[in-house]
Image (tube, helix red, strand yellow):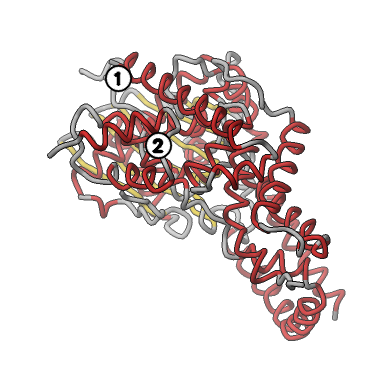
Amino acid sequence: MRMRVLLTVLMVTVVTAMMRAQDFASRYMSENAGDTTLVCISVSPRMMEEILEKGIQEKDTIGITEIISKLKSMQIVYAEKRGKGYFEKAEEMAERNSARFRKLASYDKEKDHCRIFVREQEEQIVELVLLKQEGRRFTVINFTGNMDRGFIEELKHTMILKPMKGEES
Amino acid sequence: MQEINFRHDILPLKNKLFRLALRITMDSAEAEDIVQDTMIKVWSHREELTELESVEAYCLAICRNLAIDRSQLKGAQTEELTEQNTAQPDASDPYSRFVQNEQMQIIHRLINALPEKQRTIVQLRDVEGKSYKEIAEVLQLSEEQVKVNLFRARQKIKQQFTEINNYGL
Amino acid sequence: MDYKYIEQLLERYWKCETSLEEEQILRTFFRQEEIPAHLLPYKSLFAYEENAKHVALDDDFDQRILAKVEPQKVKVRHMSLRRQFAPLYKAAAVIAVVLSLSTVAQYSFNRGEQVDYNYDAYKDTYTDPQAAYGTVSEALQIVSESIQESQVQNGDTALVPEQKVITE
């Protein structure tokens, strides 16, 4: 009896290990493999650590170290055209996986649309996905990490609103 | 001869001890270990406790010493305040959940950047509301010395906090 | 309102001449909503001190320390629990296999342990951490702004802020 349990558990482990989780951005890129309009930027856990070690200057935002220390990785996917199509596809992908992703926030403003999804494990947010369409432009911002429940509030209070480069378009 | 009861006399001190250990090590996992070790240490010497006036002061003293030892092992800063200290990352710090805004974040950092003795005294006086007499007992100093250190700490906080706020203007 | 008393207390506070009761008076005073402008800068200090008192260990701590200090009792309890739940472990393993196989098509299934992302597949875009930081910071900015925009449009209920926010 014992052996059977052990073997079952082993098989499960092997199966899950073979399919290590992809974050949203990786998945999206693989579902759109070959599409050269989409660009992907990656910051691996190693680079995230280097940011904490030497990337942040004293003059930078107070408290951002705390925020970044809760992140493991970041990926950005963006396209300069066909934003609507890409956005709808991304939104559909997130909603199709509603067991994994929960919608955290959402707004619509004329031609601009935004959705934020989170993946939670116990009390932590392990993945945050922002989908944005601004007219023709499409953006995915995808963080993984150990973001606890206070993270969202912390984020809001740490990032002071300032004009973004190229915002007026 | 008064009997010391663990659940009644030692366990209730857990949060005070945790806050002190956290203030010194700025690492919540480490702080929790220190609280456990403090309690175990105190409990295994409980015969000696019955001669003491204040079990709490004794526990706080042990806790503080353990916290200092562990901080030094990790190479954490317990020296004078420098420019770098004020930007120290504290990734596993549950305080951040309670720090609601930027101002309080600044205070938090300023206090954590003080040398250990001053930091401990601020914690025991301003957060835990202990008398100078009790603090003197915990730190094995005279009441006058406690006052001097507290004075330095408060002046420093006042001065730096004002500087930061004025600079922001 | 005459703030002279508070101002005097404050002066003495910096000189460490206040008693514990007087310090509590200061903390209570600064808890109010309406603080005159010239005293406002000090509000966060006293508010911080008040809040700092709320930091606490989680509920499991008691169990863990008692297990070490009073080991006898707890050991017995552990044994009987394991015996009780043994048959369920096997069932859980079987269910886990079924579930994992069925979700293989979409995403890999994770059974509640630490999520394990395939970070080895990442190709770092940046070699300079400062440049990487710039982009991360900008991205965080966008997320923060978007959350706030969402709150503006939908009211605070758009988020699930169940964290223990301590208000004054």
Front one among C68 and A15: C68
- Indicate which disc residue A164 carries: 1
User: Does A96 sit left or right of C63 as displayed?
Assistant: left
Spot occupied by residue C126 in the image (x, y as percentages of width and height) = 56, 17
User: Does C113 sit left or right of C48 as displayed?
Assistant: right
Quadrant of image for the C terminus of chain A: top left
Total numbered circles = 2
Quadrant of image for the N terminus of chain A: bottom right
Q: Which of disc 2 and disc 1 is earlier in sequence?
A: 2
Element class at badge 1: loop
Pointer 1 indicates a residue of which chain? A
Spot occupied by residue A98 in the image (x, y as percentages of width and height) = 42, 57
What residue is rendered at 71% in x and 72% in y?
B5
What residue is rendered at 51% in x and 15% in y?
A57
Front one among A49 and C92: A49
Looking at numbered disc 2 in the image, what kind of residue is underneath it?
Answer: Leu
Circle 2 residue: A155
Front one among C11 and C61: C11
How far separated are the C-alphas under marks 1 and 2?
17 Å
Q: Is residue A86 visible?
A: no
Whether tag 1 and tag 2 are in contact, CB under 8 A, the answer is no
What residue is rendered at 67% in x and 69% in y?
C63
Pointer 2 indicates a residue of which chain? A
Spot occupied by residue C109 in the image (x, y as percentages of width and height) = 60, 58
Q: Is residue A107 visible?
A: yes
The image quadrant that residue C103 belongs to is bottom right
- Indicate which disc residue A133 carries: none
Element class at badge 2: helix
Looking at numbered disc 1 in the image, what kind of residue is underneath it?
Answer: Met
Spot occupied by residue B31 in the image (x, y as percentages of width and height) = 66, 47
Q: Residues within 10 Å of mark 2 (few under 14, many from 20)?
A: many
Q: Residue furthest right?
A: A3
